[in-house]
Image: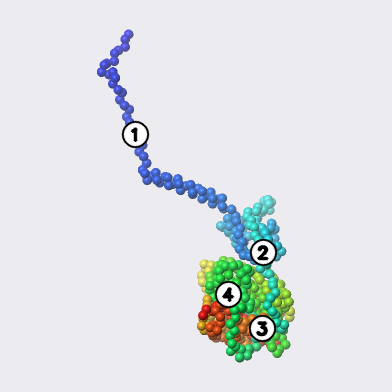
Amino acid sequence: MRPKAVPIASRGTPRPAPPPRRRRAAPPKWLEVFLTAVMVLALPVGLVVRDSVRAAEPTLAVSGQLVPGGQFTIAGSEFRPRASLILTWDGSEGPLSSVRADPSGSFSISAAVPPSATAGGHEIAAVERKGQGRGAPTKLASLAVTVVAVPTSATRQIETPVPSALPSTSQHEHEPAAPSPTQASDDGGGEESTPAPTVHAHETPAPAAAAQATPTPTSGHAHTPPPASNPPASNPPVTGASSPGCSGYPEPRIWLESQSWWLQTPGASGTDFGHAHVGTCFPYGVPVSGQVAFDVKITLFHNPGVLVRLQPHIATGSGSVNYEQPVLNWKAPNGTGELWQRVVIDTTRVSVDGLQELRMFAQIKEPDGKEMHVSTGWQLLLANGNGRSDYRHQGLGFTEGRGWYTDVDYTVARFSSVIPPAVSGVWKFNVDLKPGAGGIPVTSHTVAVDPNHHQGQPGWVVKSGGGEYVGSVSIDTRQLANGSHRLMLKADAAASSGSTNSGILVLFFNVQN
C-alpha cells in the first residue's frame, strides 16, 4: 500500500526557528570594579593577618648599661596575658626574679646584674612558671646580653693631688646631707610645708678680704661630671647650665652635686672626717615619666667612714615614696675614692605629677660611731598623666644641698632662683645659706666660682662672711671666660664638739658674653 502523498504545498517548507534564548545582561561596570578591588585588597589583608600571627612571639629587651652589680631594666611583650614568669640569668633562677605579665602580655621591671657576672656574653630568659606536677618549665623567650668590664659601682681613687693635711673648713666645698632613716620626711628646708631636716653651720667665717678677691677665670673645674662612657650617651643638655659629661640620656640634663663636710674647727680639738659628695646628671625642668635612670657618683675625700647605702626617695605633699637599694658597705681606699651607682626610679609610683622633690640620701658611718649624711633637694618634673600638684611653692627656684652629722643635724645651701641656660653681664641670683629645721646656727657662709678645695684652691670667692645669709648674690660674668663654670654655695655650722658641719650645693653655669 502506497503511503499518502504529502501535499505539494507543504513540501520544503522550513520548520519554524526556535525562539531566541534570552542573553543574561552583563554586570554594570562599577560592580566589576568593586569586585576586583575587593579581591585585590583581600590578598594583603590575609598576608598581614598571617604575618601578625607569625610575629606574635614573646620577646625580651633590656635597657641600661650591664655591669656587675649594676641595675638595669628588663621589658617583655607578646606573652600570654597575666602569664606567671621566671626570669633567669644563664639558666639560673636565683640572680633575677619572677614577674607577672599584665593583661596585654607585657611587663617591665628593674633587676640587678649578678655581682659575680664576668665580662662578655650572657643569656637572660623568660620561663613560664608551672604548677607542681605539670612538667618542666618552658623557655618562652631569651635574649643575649653583654656585660661590660667596668662595673657601674666601680671604685677608683681620685687622681688629683691630695694635700698632706686637710684644708681648713673655709677651704672645702661639700654637699649637704640627706635625711636620716628615722627622719625620711625631714628635708632640711625650715620654712617648707613638709618636715625639714635640721641643719648646722660648718666653717669658720672667711676673712672679709676674701670676698674682694680678684676673680680667677679658669678653664677647668674640680669634680667634673662623669665621662660620657659612664652614663649612657645622648644629647648635650640644653636646659640649665651646661656641663661636660651629661650627654647620653633620653632628655637634656645638667650636673648637680650635694656635699657634706665634717672638719675640725680651726683652733679646736674636734674630729675630722673629711667630705662626702653625691652628684648626678639631673633632668632639670624637663618632664620625665615611667622609669628614670640616674648614674650617681659618691665621692669620699679624706673620709675614713663606710658608705652604708644610697637611698633615693621622692617627697610629695602627701608623703614620701622610698626606693630601696642594696646595702653597699663601701670604704674608699685610704679614705679617698669614688663609687658609681646606677639607680632606676619608677616615677609611676608617685600619685601626682608636677615638681616633686628627689632626695638622694647617702649614709656614711664614721669611726667614732656617729654618721655623716648627704642629701639632695632637687625638683623632678613628673609627667605620668596624673593631676599636677607641685611639692614646693618656689617651683624650680628651689635647688638644695644638705649636710648632716649626728647630734648636729642639717646645714643647707640652697640656690633660690631658676638655673638659667646661659648668663652674661652681671648675673644676679638668690641663695639661702642657713640651718634647716631644728639645726644649730650657721656660723659662716661662702659663695665661690671655680673652686677646687681638694687641691686647696678656693677659687673666686664672690661672697663670704659670718653667720647665715639669705639674699641676693651678683657675679660680673665679664670677668670670666666664656664657657662652663662651677658655682659653689656653702653654709657652715660650728658645733660645740670642736668640729664644723657644712652643707654644700654645686652646679654649673654657662657664660656667654
Q: Give the alpha-carbon distance from disc 2 to disc 4, as whole Å.
A: 26 Å
Q: Is disc 3 in contact with disc 1, using a CB cutoff of under 8 Å?
A: no
Closest to the observer: 479 or 254?
479
Give the mark count.
Answer: 4
Q: Earlier in the sequence, mark 3 or mark 4?
A: 4
**Position of residue 47 in the picture relative to residue 21 (left or right):** right
* Structural crowding at the residue carrying mark 2, measured as other residues with C-alpha within 10 Å and reported as few (<14), some (14–19) or many (≥20): some
Q: Nearer the viewer, residue 183 or 71?
A: 71
Residue 44: x percent and y percent?
49, 49
**Residue type, label 2:** Val
Which residue position is annotated with label 3? 456
Give the foreground label among 4 and 1: 4
The relative height of residue 350 versus residue 411 in the rendered view (above or below) is above
Give coordinates of residue 295: x percent, y percent.
62, 70
Image quadrant assignment for residue 442: bottom right
Residue at horizontal 56%, vertical 57%?
Answer: 104
Question: Is residue 485 in sight in this rendering?
Answer: yes
Q: Which residue is mark 4?
A: 243
Q: Are marks 3 and 4 in contact (CB under 8 Å)?
A: no
* Residue receiving disc 2: 148
Q: Position of residue 56 (x, y in %)?
A: 57, 53
Residue at numbered disc 1:
22
Q: Secondary structure at mark 4?
A: loop
The reply to whether dot 2 and dot 3 touch (C-beta < 8 Å) is no
CA separation in Å, label 3 and label 4 = 22 Å
Residues tagged 1 and 2 counted as in contact (Cβ below 8 A): no
Element carrying mark 1: loop
Asked if disc 2 and disc 4 are in contact, CB closer than 8 Å, the reply is no
389 left or right, relative to 455:
left
Between the residue at mark 4 and the residue at mark 1, the CA separation in whole angstroms equals 90 Å
Q: CA distance from mark 3 to mark 1?
A: 111 Å
